[in-house]
Image (cartoon, rainbow, N blue to C red):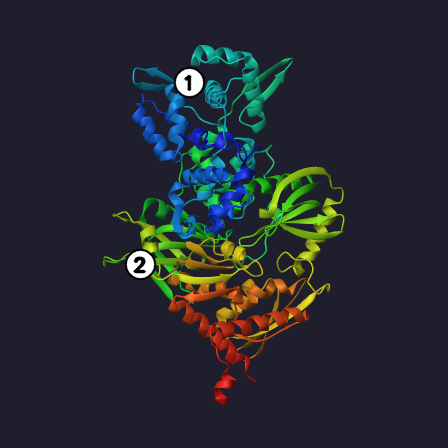
């Protein structure tokens, strides 16, 4: 283990390990069949080091399980943000980072030659001018430095006005403390908070899926493509199979579920001329391609289709254009009016009609009623009838219900009467 | 622009703190700081580099390390961070935090920066439709007062309409503000003021609060909110058996990722998962478990099992109604 390095070069290599170790939390060394034991051991050691306070080890036959004890009710930040802070660097990188930024704190513009000279005189470190110029250019690209050309001379400067403003406005710190867990790309808010030396001690966030942060690099690339309105090539790896597929599509929108913990890219497939959704955790790489000329038209078309989307499916198994689902439920008035409120709040635009005392009918037309089943099941105990033009949905609901009756030994009241 | 960059790395952060120190540091001080802020094995990488001068960031005077940086060293923002802040300015909740003048000032400083995303590029398709009214003046006022009370550990005089329609008036100290992404609502986790030793954590929806007045009374002893929450969990967790059909395992693992859980493989296709919860979470957890249908089997605890069976019994009776 002498060559063990705590830091890593590429995020994508570690992404699947973190997910497997900590989302599932029951995989042992023998479960990682497609990786070498040495790779497994090194990755496991890194994860234990980065996430030490949250790692739980349970000994089982055949090794031990590593899992992450994450209870969002108890955490002020997302522990998985740590994984983003593990990028390796060279000895030059870290020295140049501090010395260049320190030297330019006064806001004055300097050439790479001047900076190189002053690093030697003021900080007693010797670098060649090309190395300093390369770092200054790279920092100008990241936005840390401002690069200006005057004639043939290129000068670099630093502007701390925004950081000073953030430091002097406590309200923005509170906002960042909130958005790091409750918003998109929360890792960036977390990095800002660290720069400001602020820790969240105010907010807790429910129904936030910490594991989403592992997809943020993919999300970032997709947002750039959407901003530029370009097509993309995606490398997609199915969660069930190990095969990678290549997909060419036009990215339009990110769909998020607050219940299932999944995020999707909604995109248009030119080849089959239809919309489709890809889980972000299955997207391994994004390559930006040419500008999509019909981008605005596709967005408008997606907007027209949206009222008929229950989740992310644009077509049912039965391949009808639209399916209609009608559910009648029992809610005792007025004490159980909250059930009717639930239908309004969670029903995604379905109509609700009071058909008799204590009886309400919910009706909706969507592309794929199969996606509704998990939600429909949450009303078990109140469902008087369920009808759907997609008969397979009806069958599945009643079959699953029968299976549940069997599992939990719920007798048929009619049988009881006969006895 | 890169999210995965050494600029944001843990080592850079630790070094920034060490280098900002105005006082000479001993190697012990450096050790302690790395142990506090670094990863578990960071000491092994950082200390030799500082000791042998490969990272020539300190002047050595005998056994002491003196920073070569100025005490006012500040890292400026990257374009990624600026672009992120610009996107936040369009979020409907930002008005809870920033005054209009502050939003305007920040917007001016970011005038030439494109936002990292637009609100319409995201669609949260299963979020509840009755989210909190973030633009409402009373709501904003109450939110800010509760935020101030939380930060200063102040008791607040709160008028509240309970979900059952009762008007409640009490002194509470807000311990945390909790946001639910699913409900799109803020709640206050608060301790009620009374003289008994044992205090119970109350949860109040901010949009049900009609009035907040700050008092001068502060919460004196420090409160460990996590112990209060942990102590509220049932001793017996929910025990689920998962048969890995229709991708049930992966779906369940993600779905319940928010809860403290422990999953064990029983055989090739069967798994057992323990989920820790309290009374406040029970109904929501029951609904979540029911949404999986027969793909999950509840095998414990008795309390949970009885609630589930109760719903199924009611369903079986309803199906036979004329």
Front-most of residues A289 and A407: A407
Instruction: Name the chain letter of the residue that bears numbered label 1.
Output: B
Circle 2 crowding by C-alpha within 10 Å: few under 14, some 14–19, many from 20:
few
> Considering only vertical position in the picture, is A121 above or below A222?
above
Front-most of residues A350 and A258: A258
Instruction: Name, please, the residue furthest toward the front.
Output: A62
SS at mark 2? loop
> Considering only vertical position in the picture, is A85 above or below A370?
above
Count of numbered labels shown in the rendering? 2
Contact (Cβ within 8 Å) of mark 2 with mark 1: no
Q: Which residue appears at 49% of the width and 74% of the height? A: B312
Q: Distance between the Cα atoms at labels 2 and 1?
A: 54 Å
Give residue B56's mark: 1
Asked if labels 2 and 1 share a chain, the reply is yes
Instruction: Name the chain letter of the residue that bears numbered label 2.
Output: B
Task: Point out residue A319 in the picture as x, y percentages from the top left corner.
Answer: 72, 63
Instruction: Name, please, the residue furthest toward the bottom.
Output: A418
Quadrant where the image shows the N terminus of chain B: top right
Residue located beneath label 2 in the image: B200
SS at mark 1? loop
Q: In the visual, does B279 lie left or right of B196? A: right
């Amino acid at each position: 283990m002498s060559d063990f390095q705590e830091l890593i070069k590429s995020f994508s290599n570690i992404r699947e390990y973190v997910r497997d170790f900590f989302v599932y939390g029951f995989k042992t060394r023998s479960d990682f069949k497609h990786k070498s034991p040495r790779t497994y051991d090194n990755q496991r050691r890194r994860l234990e080091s980065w996430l030490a306070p949250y790692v739980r080890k349970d000994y089982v036959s055949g090794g031990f399980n590593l899992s992450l004890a994450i209870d969002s009710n108890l955490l002020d930040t997302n522990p998985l943000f740590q994984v983003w802070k593990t990028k390796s660097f060279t000895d030059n990188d870290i020295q140049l980072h501090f010395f260049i930024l320190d030297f330019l704190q006064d806001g004055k513009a300097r050439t790479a030659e001047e900076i190189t000279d002053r690093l030697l005189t003021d900080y007693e470190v010797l670098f060649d001018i090309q190395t300093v110029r390369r770092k200054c250019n790279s920092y100008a690209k990241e936005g840390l430095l401002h690069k200006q050309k005057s004639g043939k001379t290129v000068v670099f400067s630093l502007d701390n006005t925004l950081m000073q403003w953030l430091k002097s406005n406590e309200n923005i710190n509170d906002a960042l403390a909130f958005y790091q867990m409750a918003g998109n790309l929360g890792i960036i808010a977390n990095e800002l908070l660290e720069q400001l030396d602020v820790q969240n001690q105010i907010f807790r966030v429910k129904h936030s899926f910490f594991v989403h942060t592992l997809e943020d690099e993919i999300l970032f690339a997709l947002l750039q493509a959407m901003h530029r309105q370009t097509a993309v090539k995606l490398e997609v790896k199915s969660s069930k199979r190990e095969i990678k597929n290549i997909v060419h599509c036009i990215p339009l929108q990110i769909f998020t579920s607050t219940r299932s913990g999944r995020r999707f890219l909604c995109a248009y497939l030119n080849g089959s001329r239809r919309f489709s959704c890809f889980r972000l955790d299955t997207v391994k790489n994004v390559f930006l391609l040419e500008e999509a000329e019909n981008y605005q038209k596709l967005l408008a078309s997606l907007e027209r289709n949206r009222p008929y989307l229950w989740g992310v499916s644009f077509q049912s198994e039965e391949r009808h254009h639209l399916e209609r689902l009608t559910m009648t439920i029992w809610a005792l008035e007025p004490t159980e009016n909250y059930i009717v409120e639930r239908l309004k709040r969670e029903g995604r635009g379905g109509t609700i009609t009071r058909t008799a005392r204590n009886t309400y009918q919910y009706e909706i037309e969507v592309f794929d009623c199969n996606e509704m089943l998990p939600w429909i099941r949450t009303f078990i105990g109140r469902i008087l009838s369920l009808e759907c033009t997609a008969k397979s949905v009806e069958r599945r609901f009643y079959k699953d219900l029968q299976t549940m009756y069997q599992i939990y030994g719920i007798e048929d009241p009619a049988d009881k009467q006969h006895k | 622009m890169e999210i995965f960059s050494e600029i944001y790395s843990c080592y850079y952060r630790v070094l920034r703190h060490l280098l900002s120190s105005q006082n000479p540091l001993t190697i012990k001080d450096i050790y302690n700081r790395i142990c506090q802020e670094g990863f578990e094995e960071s000491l092994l990488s950082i200390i030799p580099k500082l000791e042998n001068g490969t990272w020539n960031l300190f002047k050595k005077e005998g056994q002491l390390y003196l920073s070569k940086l100025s005490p006012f060293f500040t890292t400026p923002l990257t374009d990624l961070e600026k672009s992120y802040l610009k996107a936040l300015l369009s979020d409907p909740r930002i008005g809870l935090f920033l005054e209009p003048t502050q939003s305007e000032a920040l917007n001016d400083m970011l005038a030439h920066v494109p936002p990292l995303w637009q609100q319409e590029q995201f669609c949260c398709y299963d979020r509840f439709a009755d989210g909190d009214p973030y633009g409402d003046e009373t709501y904003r006022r109450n939110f800010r007062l509760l935020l101030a009370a939380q930060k200063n550990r102040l008791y607040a005089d709160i008028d509240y309409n309970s979900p059952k329609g009762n008007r409640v008036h009490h002194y509470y100290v807000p311990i945390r503000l909790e946001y639910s992404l699913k409900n799109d609502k803020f709640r206050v986790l608060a301790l009620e003021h009374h003289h008994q030793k044992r205090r119970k954590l109350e949860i109040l929806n901010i949009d049900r609060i009609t009035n907040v007045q700050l008092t001068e009374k502060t919460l004196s002893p420090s409160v460990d909110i996590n112990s209060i929450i942990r102590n509220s969990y049932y001793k017996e967790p929910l025990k689920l058996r998962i048969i890995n059909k229709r991708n049930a395992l992966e779906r369940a693992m993600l779905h319940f990722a928010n809860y403290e859980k422990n999953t064990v493989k029983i055989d090739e296709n069967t798994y057992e998962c323990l989920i820790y919860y309290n009374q406040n979470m029970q109904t929501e957890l029951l609904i979540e478990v029911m949404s999986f249908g027969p793909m999950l089997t509840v095998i414990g605890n008795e309390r949970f099992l009885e609630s589930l069976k109760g719903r199924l019994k009611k369903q079986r009776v309803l199906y036979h109604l004329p």
